[in-house]
Image (spheres, rainbow, N blue to C red):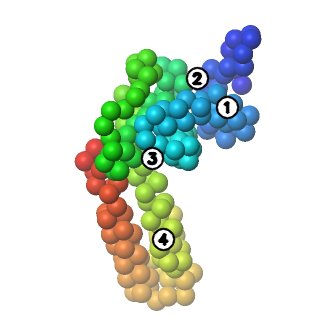
Amino acid sequence: MQLIGKTKEKYSNEALIAGIKQKDRMILEYIYRQYFPMIIEFVGKNSGTKEDAKDIFHDGLTTIYEKSIREDISLQSSFKTYLYAICKNLWLMVLRRRKTASKIEAKEDFMTTVSSNIEEDIISQQRYKLYRHYFKTLGEDCQKVLTMFFEGISLREIATKMDFSEAYAKKKKFTCQKELISRIEKDKLYTELLVKS
């Protein structure tokens, strides 16, 4: 990994992104030590707790990780600014859901030259988080059937593996999918993400 500076350990934007993508423990610990305090401060000044800040920080890193898997990330700002902007937007979404978003204390210097795709990245990550949450609430058979279906396994193979008739496998897939969609659509976050897209 590429280091910058002589007195203070500091990684380049590219090294930090690569470290997140590769789940490099040393890089992740560095990011946590270096940048988590600013997120605790921001969330704390805006009606949040340290636990809220942990959740937001984790979601911010997850957003960066998922984007790095899909495409190369080329930052127009520092990594610090990029992470701060993502976490700020995530926290604003939480506050909107709590209906407490009013005057947000933000360091404006962090908000310059940040990727215009941040909102898209956050929406994508939040949709996936919503899907994962409600997928886990389904029964075991539903999870198995939908996992196989999403992996491209035919209904005939699913029926064989689950010891179902093919007609029942088709019906089960349909009802499980319908139930998953129904649970997701009842969530307030779903409505908010729908409006933003």
Q: Residue furthest left?
A: 195
Marks 3/2: CA–CA distance: 21 Å
| Residue pointed to by mark 3 | 125
Q: Is 68 in front, or is 40?
A: 40
Q: Secondary structure at mark 1?
A: helix
* Residue at 49% across, 24% down: 81
Between marks 3 and 1, how big is the CA–CA gap?
A: 23 Å
Residue drawn at the location 51% of the way across and 72% of the way down: 143
Percent of width and height locating residue 125: 45, 47
Give the residue type at disc 4: Thr
Q: Nearer the viewer, residue 73 or 191?
A: 191
Going from N to C along the chain, the mark reached first, 3 or 1, is: 1
Quick check: 143 above or below 27?
below
Instruction: Indicate which disc, 2 or 1, sits on the residue closer to the N terminus.
Output: 2
Mark number displayed over residue 13: 2
The residue that label 4 is drawn on is: 137
Q: Where does label 1 land, which residue?
A: 33
